[in-house]
Image (cartoon, rainbow, N blue to C red):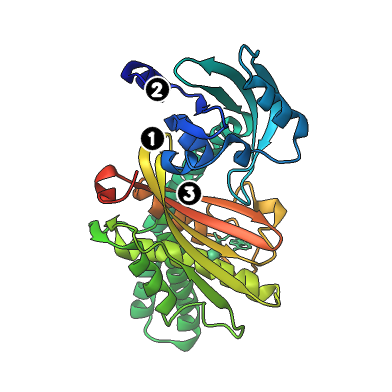
Amino acid sequence: MQADAKAVLESLATAVLLTDHTLKIVYANSAAEQLFSMSRSKLTAYKLTDLLDKGQKSLLESIQLALKPHAQGFNASSIEIIPEPHQSIRTDIYVSHYSGKGRGLIVEFRALDYQQKINQEMARRSQHLAARDLIRSLAHEIKNPLGGIRGAAQLLEMTYGRQEHLTDYTQVIIEQADRLKSLVDRLLGPQRPNPLTLCNIHYVIEKVLSLENMALKTQMPIRFIKDYDPSIPEIMLDVDAMQQAVLNIISNAVHALSEAHIHHPQITIQTRAQLGSRLINGIKYPSALITSITDNGPGIPENIRETLFYPMVTSRPDGSGLGLSIAQSIVERHNGLIECDSEPGRTVFRIVLPLRKENLKGRED
Ligand SMILES: Nc1ncnc2c1ncn2[C@@H]1O[C@H](COP(=O)(O)OP(=O)(O)OP(=O)(O)O)[C@@H](O)[C@H]1O
Ligand SMILES: [Mg+2]
């Protein structure tokens, strides 16, 4: 392909695939890599028909017809594309014939769900940031007088001596002030982030799984399945904070599994480098590191799905609803995001972190 034509295709926001006369994909632009969450090299190992639901007979026929010399192109709306199991994209497609040195099809995709998903993601993110800022400023306002209240109770104790009937009251004030302070501290999150160091995500996960003091110690024999991509490069991480983020997600899965008394409870932790450009928080990165934590529990309760990452959203009587909000803030500090898909029997939290080209030296692109 000519360099100019290629540059034009690369800068299109529309996903475009080119096939040869056997329908083998010979080229995919960056928007296609992003739409299908697959690298160009992976996409070009497929035929166009591999991506389509085999039940769509008339579409498959139209595609074959479009291959014929001098054939007209065609449009089809609301086509279901299944690039990978559990992934389905609904899109309009525009198919046209090309011929020259070779012949084949040009297929453009306008993914309705995808655009909607991006818009929803952006809207959710700005709502989340607004809610978080509001809660942070409230927490600050509460924290300041708390010190004064606690100090005054201590002064009362000192002034009036240790008279039992008085210390009962002052102790309540001190205890409750301490309780509120620790809640407020959690709401405010880590004040001074640690410096970033080069670290492998598997180290972080292993550290979490081996932690003794955490909720993973349950009565239930939960099966942990590790599916690591060993070639994942090290990236710059605030290791302690990222450990906290992973721990919050895993302990939620453990809680969900234990409370629902699932028969064969299991949590799968998978890591993958997703090659091919990827939009994260509105910024395009050459590739991403995806850590998925999947459990076979009951799923996220319907009534909190929309506000899942907001602070103080919880369905547990003893939950403070801060775990996911803190995890999201930590991952965002690494320019990443956490996604969630949930249905009864399968809940996935995906930590998506940007990977830069230099992290990927030595890997195929
Ligand atoms: N894997 C999961 N399966 C089912 N529900 C989940 C899962 N992860 C999170 N949730 C739901 O999301 C809610 C919010 O989680 P989050 O970690 O923010 O708070 P929490 O666990 O309730 O309290 P804590 O602050 O102690 O973590 C949970 O109360 C639970 O209802
Ligand atoms: Mg939690």
Q: Residues within 10 Å of mark 2 (few under 14, many from 20)?
A: few
> Which residue is labeled 3 in the image?
135
Q: Find residue 221 and report its horizontal and vertical position in percent.
A: 59, 83
Q: Is residue 250 above or below residue 330?
A: below
Q: Secondary structure at mark 3?
A: helix
Q: Earlier in the sequence, mark 1 or mark 3?
A: 3
Nearest the viewer among 146 and 51 is 51
The reply to whether dot 1 and dot 2 touch (C-beta < 8 Å) is no
Q: CA distance from mark 1 to mark 3?
A: 30 Å
Q: Earlier in the sequence, mark 1 or mark 2?
A: 2
Q: CA distance from mark 3 to mark 2?
A: 40 Å
In terms of image quarters, where does ligand 1 lie? Answer: bottom right
Q: Earlier in the sequence, mark 3 or mark 2?
A: 2
Instruction: Using the rendered image of the protein, determine whether residue 314 is visible from the camera's viewpoint.
Output: no
Front tag of 1 and 3 = 1
Q: Residues within 10 Å of mark 1 (few under 14, many from 20)?
A: few
> Which residue is labeled 2 in the image?
11
Q: Residues within 10 Å of mark 3 (few under 14, many from 20)?
A: some
> Which residue is labeled 1 in the image?
284
Q: Amino acid at mark 1?
A: Lys
Q: What is the total number of numbered labels drawn onto the structure image?
A: 3
Q: Residue drawn at (43%, 61%), measured in percent from left and top? A: 245
Q: Secondary structure at mark 2?
A: helix
Q: Find residue 30 and report its horizontal and vertical position in percent.
A: 42, 31
Q: Amino acid at mark 3?
A: Ile
Quadrant the N terminus occupies: top left
Nearest the viewer among 72 and 112 is 72
Q: Secondary structure at mark 1?
A: strand
